[in-house]
Image (tube, rainbow, N blue to C red):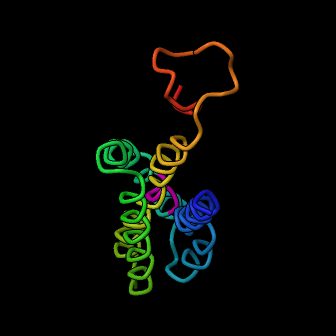
């Protein structure tokens, strides 16, 4: 059950993270954006998600993946909701920064889910600590 819910949560976060590649074409037309402006709008959540992964991964180790994952999901939901209030290019860029938080869910999810699976596939330990999971090894 937990694995299925984590998979669903990651799928939703990934969809939110890439939302501007879906709705961006219409935004580009509506606001009359240049190709450079459009590229920045689409790239902002990707960059934000890539940078925040480090922090979220550390927090997942310190505070637990479930708590951090819930925080990422709530933050992504709020940022997506606030996106409905964006009306010009700067507000869409600001919303893109918030939506990018959803991109950090990958680091949290890998840390959270990998602890469920101990190394049992290899007869000899591949690391010092045999209690580490295969994904962490």
Residue drawn at x 38%, y 81% as measured from the top left? 82
Residue drawn at x 44%, y 67% as measured from the top left? 73
Spot occupied by residue 1 in the image (x, y as percentages of width and height):
62, 63
Query: Does 102 appear above or below 24?
Result: above
User: So how many labels did they put on this image?
Assistant: 0
Residue drawn at x 48%, y 48% as measured from the top left? 112
Query: Does 95 appear above or below 7?
Result: below
Q: Could you say which is closer to the camera, residue 29 or residue 7?
A: 7
Spot occupied by residue 98 in the image (x, y as percentages of width and height):
37, 66
Query: Is 64 placed left or right of 121 in the picture?
Result: left
Q: Could you say which is closer to the camera, residue 12 or residue 137?
A: 137
Spot occupied by residue 58 in the image (x, y as percentages of width and height):
33, 42
Residue drawn at x 60%, y 75% as measured from the top left? 23
The image quadrant of residue 116 is top right
Stretch of the chain drawn in magenta = 42-46
Q: Which SS type dominates the magenta stretch?
A: helix
Query: Is 98 placed left or right of 34 in the picture?
Result: left
> Residue 101: within the magenta?
no
> Residue 45: within the magenta?
yes
Query: Does 49 appear above or below 88?
Result: above
């Amino acid at each position: 059950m937990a694995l299925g819910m984590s998979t669903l949560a990651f799928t939703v976060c990934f969809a939110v993270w890439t939302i501007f590649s879906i709705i961006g074409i219409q935004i580009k037309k509506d606001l009359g954006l240049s190709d450079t402006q459009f590229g920045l709008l689409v790239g902002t959540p990707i960059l934000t998600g890539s940078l925040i992964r480090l922090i979220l991964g550390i927090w997942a180790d310190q505070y637990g993946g479930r708590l951090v994952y819930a925080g990422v999901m709530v933050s992504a939901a709020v940022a997506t909701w606030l996106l409905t209030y964006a009306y010009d290019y700067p507000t869409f860029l600001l919303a893109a920064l918030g939506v990018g938080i959803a991109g950090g869910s990958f680091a949290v999810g890998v840390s959270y889910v990998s602890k469920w699976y101990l190394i049992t596939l290899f007869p000899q330990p591949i690391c010092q600590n045999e209690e580490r999971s295969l994904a962490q090894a």
